[in-house]
C-alpha cells in the first residue's frame, strides 16, 4: 500500500514537472514575441525612451515580467524537483548539485521579476516631475536586475541544464538525444558568462526551449518510468 502511495505521489510530481517544463518553453516564446516583436525593446536604448515606454505599457510590462520571471522561477522549481525525483537513483550526487543550482536560479528569477516591476513603477512616477532622477534610479535598477537575471551570461541556467542532462544521460532517465540537446544548451549557457561571449545567450535560449518541450513531453508520457527502472539498477549494483 505504501509503495503504491509513493508511486502515485511520484507520478503526480513528475507530471506536474512536465506541465512546468512546457510552461517554461511557452514563457520563452511569449517573452520573445512581446519584447522583441510587439515592443521592439532591444532597439529602445536611451534611458528616457525606455521610461517613456514603461509609462505607455506599464501594466503589460508588469504582467510580462510576472510571467517570464516570477512564475517562471516557481515553475522552474517544480521542474527541478520533478527531474530530481526521476533521475536521482541513477546519479544521486549530480542531481543534488543540479537541484541546488536550480533553486538558486529560480529564487533569483523571482527576485528579478519583483524588483523590475517595482523599479518600473517607481521611475514612471518619478519621471513626471524629475526625469533626470528617474533615469538615475532606472540605471541602478537595470544594472542589478540584468546581473542577477543572466543578462551578462546564463551561468546558473546553463550549469543546471548541463548537470541535469549529464545526470539524465547516466541514468537513462530521458532519451539520449534530448540529453545531448540539454548538454549543448547548458554548455552554451555556461560559456555565455565569459567576457565577450554573451552572444551565446541566444543559442542557449533556443536550445533550452527545445529541451523544455522535449522534457515536458517525456515526463507527461511516462511519469514513473525512471522510478520503476531505478530499483532494478540499484538491486544490481548492490
Image: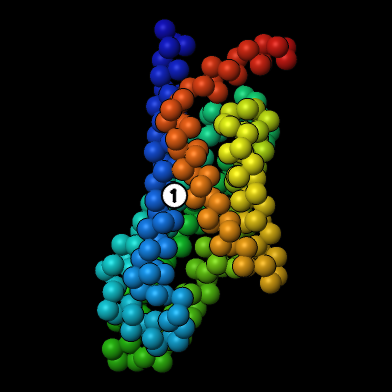
Q: Is residue 113 above or below residue 55?
A: above
Q: Residue at x 61, y 51 (%)?
A: 185
Q: Residues within 10 Å of mark 1 (few under 14, many from 20)?
A: many
Q: Residue at x 67, y 52 (%)?
A: 187
Q: Residue furthest right?
A: 237
Query: Does 37 sit left or right of 210 as displayed?
Result: left
Image coloring type: rainbow
* Residue 65, quarter of the rendered image: bottom left
Above or below, 12 against 133 in this view is above
Q: Is residue 72 left or right of residue 230?
A: left
Tell me if 130 is positioned left or right of 206 in this view.
left
Residue 82: image location, x then y, percent: 49, 33
For residue 110, say whether it is visible. Answer: no
* Residue found 66% across the figure and 16% down from its top: 233
- Quadrant for the C terminus, please: top right
Where is residue 89 shown, x and y percent of the image? 62, 24
x and y percentages locating residue 155 in the rendered image: 63, 57
Residue 133, position as x, y percentages in the image? 41, 89
Amino acid at each position: 500500500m505504501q509503495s503504491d502511495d509513493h508511486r502515485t505521489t511520484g507520478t503526480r510530481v513528475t507530471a506536474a514537472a512536465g506541465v512546468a517544463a512546457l510552461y517554461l518553453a511557452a514563457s520563452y516564446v511569449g517573452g520573445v514575441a512581446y519584447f522583441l516583436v510587439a515592443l521592439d525593446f532591444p532597439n529602445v536604448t536611451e534611458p528616457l525612451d525606455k521610461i517613456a515606454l514603461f509609462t505607455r505599457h506599464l501594466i503589460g510590462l508588469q504582467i510580462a515580467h510576472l510571467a517570464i520571471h516570477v512564475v517562471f522561477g516557481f515553475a522552474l522549481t517544480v521542474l527541478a524537483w520533478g527531474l530530481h525525483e526521476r533521475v536521482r537513483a541513477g546519479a544521486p550526487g549530480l542531481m543534488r548539485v543540479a537541484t541546488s543550482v536550480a533553486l538558486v536560479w529560480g529564487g533569483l528569477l523571482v527576485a528579478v521579476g519583483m524588483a523590475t516591476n517595482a523599479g518600473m513603477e517607481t521611475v514612471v512616477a518619478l519621471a513626471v516631475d524629475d526625469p533626470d532622477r528617474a533615469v538615475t534610479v532606472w540605471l541602478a535598477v537595470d544594472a542589478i536586475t540584468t546581473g542577477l537575471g543572466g543578462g551578462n551570461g546564463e551561468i546558473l541556467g546553463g550549469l543546471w541544464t548541463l548537470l541535469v542532462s549529464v545526470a539524465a544521460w547516466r541514468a537513462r532517465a530521458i532519451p539520449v538525444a534530448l540529453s545531448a540537446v540539454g548538454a549543448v544548451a547548458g554548455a552554451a549557457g555556461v560559456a555565455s558568462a565569459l567576457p565577450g561571449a554573451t552572444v551565446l545567450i541566444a543559442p542557449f535560449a533556443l536550445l533550452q526551449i527545445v529541451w523544455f518541450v522535449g522534457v515536458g513531453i517525456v515526463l507527461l508520457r511516462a511519469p514513473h518510468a525512471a522510478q520503476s527502472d531505478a530499483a532494478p539498477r540499484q538491486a544490481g549494483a548492490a
